[in-house]
Amino acid sequence: MGPHEWINAIILEVGLLPVEGVQVLGVVNKQLDKMHKQSKERMKQQKQRFIETEGAVRPGSGSSGAETAGRAMAANLSRNGPALQEAYVRVVTEKSPTDWALFTYEGNSNDIRVAGTGEGGLEEMVEELNSGKVMYAFCRVKDPNSGLPKFVLINWTGEGVNDVRKGACASHVSTMANFLKGAHVTINARAEEDVEPECIMEKVAKASGANYSFHKESGRFQDAGPQAPVGSVYQKTNAVSEIKRVGKDSFWAKAEKEEENRRLEEKRRAEEAQRQLEQERRERELREAARREQRYQEQRGEASPQRTWEEQQQEVVSRNRDEQESAMHPREIFKQKERAMSTTSVSSPQPDLPGEELAPSTPPCLLQAEEEAVYEGPPEQETFYEEPPLVQQQGAGSEHIDYHIQGQGLSGQGLCARALYDYQAADDTEISFDPENLITGIEVIDEGWWRGYGPDGHFGMFPANYVELIE
């Protein structure tokens, strides 16, 4: 039963007249129509609100699920429409100081909002890009070829945006391109390398075509006369770009200075290492020379025979006798020794006598020198002469044999010997020779030291145990 039929039934039930029933029916119908319109309006508003928030459609609304889902995923430009339009108009207006605008989403919704605007150009705009958001930048730049204003649209998808959000916002690129009309260059960027100002300007220059300028005239049409002074045009300083430029210059200057300091430090270290190597080399040479000298002294000490008691006494006497006695030729001394040995050999068969009786066997000159130099004390010191006669007799015998051999080799070059080892002279009184060198004119001045002519013709002393006599 409809509303009208229901009202007619009420009128008949209460017994109203037909005229009165018609009047009541008209009033009721008007009220019902008004209520019906209000109900439809409320349902429409609820439906729109449900679509925007939940993305679902009430049953019986007449819209399909695919169309509703598409409207729910689309970018919403109407929520913040006036602010979006104002930012866009400020950028496209050539006389406006604002040259860039940045747009992004409100939270995780699809509502587009203005993220920021500025007057610092690409350098300032790039600093505002967030690696964790999806953003849209619209910039006004000057074409490097023509000098005319150009517009650049940058679709920024940060590296930190998850894949689900990237997929949901992929369809919004065309919507934003339709809203931000007039872009000459469109760039899809994901990292900072994609939005370098130099790279963007290169793309703008390539997109403009030929390299020409509408504001340049040929020089032939210029007046060659005096030109009036041109007033300066004030240009606002961009603090951000100026700081970046100064910072970049100071960075490279600092890098060059550090590189120069590094080279100087390496050079200094190399010189220090070279000096240290030279010092170590000199020290090593000195140590080696000292070791060689030590070995030489040891070899010389080992090669020298043990000095006899008479030689020690001769050294004491020679240090204290005057210049006249020290100038005595060694040949005369050994002649006296030979005479003393002959006396000793004659007296050797006699029985052993006390030390006082053996004392006269010492050559008079040696005895006199010993008494003058050392043995000027009491007679008790004559006890030193008890043992030496045995050694003296042995030495005398060997010297007698050496003189006998020397007498046999005097024909020709005298007594000769061949060097068994190398020997280097310690001073000018000695001679130097190498193994197998021949030494001639040898004089046996002592049991351990002889004199002769070396390979270079120099006459001097040398150790007797370093050579062997040639028969």
Image (cartoon, rainbow, N blue to C red):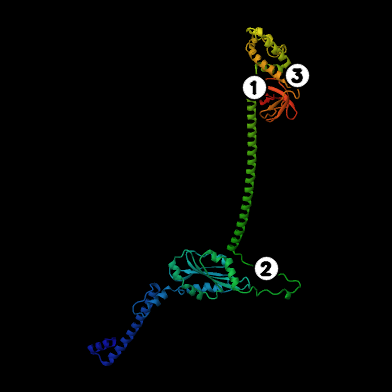
Q: Nearer the viewer, residue 452 or 417?
A: 417
Residue displayed at 24% across by 88% down: 9
Callout 2 amino acid: Ser
**Residue 245 can be seen in this image:** yes
Callout 1 amino acid: Pro
Residue carrying label 2: 232
Quarter of the figure that contains the C terminus? top right
Tell me the tag on residue 305: 1
Q: Nearer the viewer, residue 177 or 411?
A: 411
Which one is in front in this view, the residue at disc 2 or the one at disc 3?
3
Tell me the tag on residue 329: 3
Looking at the picture, how far across and down is residue 340, in whole percent? 70, 12
Quarter of the figure that contains the N terminus? bottom left
Q: How many marks?
A: 3
Q: Earlier in the sequence, mark 2 or mark 3?
A: 2
Binning the other alpha carbons within 10 Å of mark 1 as few (below 14), some (14 to 19) or many (20 upward) gives some
Binning the other alpha carbons within 10 Å of mark 2 as few (below 14), some (14 to 19) or many (20 upward) gives few
Q: Give the quadrant of residue 34.
A: bottom left
- CA–CA distance in space, label 2 to label 3: 114 Å
Q: Earlier in the sequence, mark 2 or mark 1?
A: 2
Please give left or right for residue 464 compared with residue 12 in the image.
Answer: right
In what element is the residue under mark 1? loop
Tell me the tag on residue 149: none
Q: Give the quadrant of residue 364.
A: top right
Looking at the picture, how far across and down is residue 292, in whole percent? 64, 32
- CA–CA distance in space, label 3 to label 1: 23 Å
Looking at the picture, how far across and down is residue 28, in whole percent? 31, 86
In what element is the residue under mark 2? loop
